[in-house]
Image (tube, helix red, strand yellow):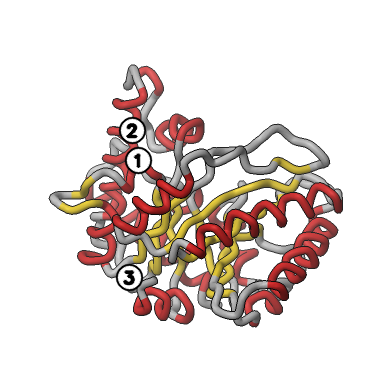
Amino acid sequence: MNQEQLRIMSGKKGFIAALDQSGGSTPKALKNYGIREDQYSNDEEMFNLVHEMRTRIITSPSFTSDHILAAILFENTMERKIGDKLTADYLWEEKGIIPILKVDKGLAEETDGVRLMKPIPGLDELLGRAVERHIFGTKMRSVIKQANPAGIKKIVDQQFEIGLRIAASGLVPILEPEIDIYSPDKAESEQIMKDETKKHLAELPEDTKLMFKLSIPDKHGFYSDLMKDSHVVRVVALSGGYSRQEANERLSRSPGLIASFSRALSEGLNANQTQGEFDRMLAQSIKEIYDASIT
């Protein structure tokens, strides 16, 4: 574990840029960026286009460590280069931004009001490559749809079980048990999820470090107790379907919670913009998300 990166992640002001759309979510990300599905004919062309989009974001003058602590990548991006450097090395060496890797393979079908992660075949091999590529940590997502105690327990158990494997490899896992913002009993789900999480935290080895990526809670300051736990490096928030403006407003009412936005970060960016237009729009997004993350 890179101790300088751990220090930055633990206490520096800023937010995490989520650039980890993969598989099924990639066409949607490209469409939002102004690239239609008929503009590419296979996965290779699609991933080339999305890497060009991410490269444009990462190399923008506004994408700096003044506001951004880390960027979440997916496996395909980790294996590609920006200029003559692998993406993770470019982020850290050229920008001072910490690289994080998405490791999950998507969601299983809903059972007991939740969607667990699909199995992650080859996880140990992937973690080995991540260490070789100078990745700091990982992220993996599952989703809670209803306040079903049995289902939520399965979600939290799975996140910690895999998270401990990741931590054993020397990486810092980000556990993401997302709660659907449209859930009719979201606040109840938040309480159940937090209670289950605290049980696991109480049983962790003293030197285990992890992070959480959570839906912005309905109750202000709801995750403050998780932030104080000695195992927890940082608690970050997903935008979860809110517009950037609403996500920022909600985030600013949760002290200590910082953003890890994907769609809300790239909102308004378009392939057809001039470089100047693109950079100005991205700079505005970054400033607004940063301001909401430090209140």
Q: Quadrant of the N terminus?
A: bottom left
User: Residue 119 appears at what percent x and percent y?
Assistant: 59, 39
Measuring 45% from the left and 38% from the top, which residue is drawn there?
Answer: 22
**Could you say whether the residue bearing mark 3 is in a helix, strand or loop?**
loop
| Most foreground residue, 207 or 173 | 207
User: Residue 77 appears at what percent x and percent y?
Assistant: 33, 44
Q: Reply above or below: 24 against 202.
A: above
User: Residue 204 appears at what percent x and percent y?
Assistant: 65, 72
| 47 to the left or right of 20 | left
| 280 to the left or right of 121 | left
Q: Marks 3 and 2, how far apart in space?
A: 26 Å
Label pair 2/1, CB-CB below 8 angstroms = yes
Which image quadrant for residue 221?
Answer: bottom right
Q: Marks 3 and 1, how far apart in space?
A: 23 Å
* Kind of residue at disc 1: Asn
How packed mark 1 is, by other alpha carbons closer than 10 Å (few <14, some 14-19, many 20 or more), is few
User: Which residue matches tag 3?
Assistant: 65
| 261 to the left or right of 129 | right
Which image quadrant for residue 76?
Answer: top left
Residue 220 visible in the picture: no
Q: In which quarter of the image is the C terminus?
A: bottom right
**Could you say whether the residue bearing mark 2 is in a helix, strand or loop?**
helix
* Kind of residue at disc 3: Ser
- Mark 2 and mark 1 lie on one chain; the one further toward the N terminus is 2
User: Which residue matches tag 2?
Assistant: 47
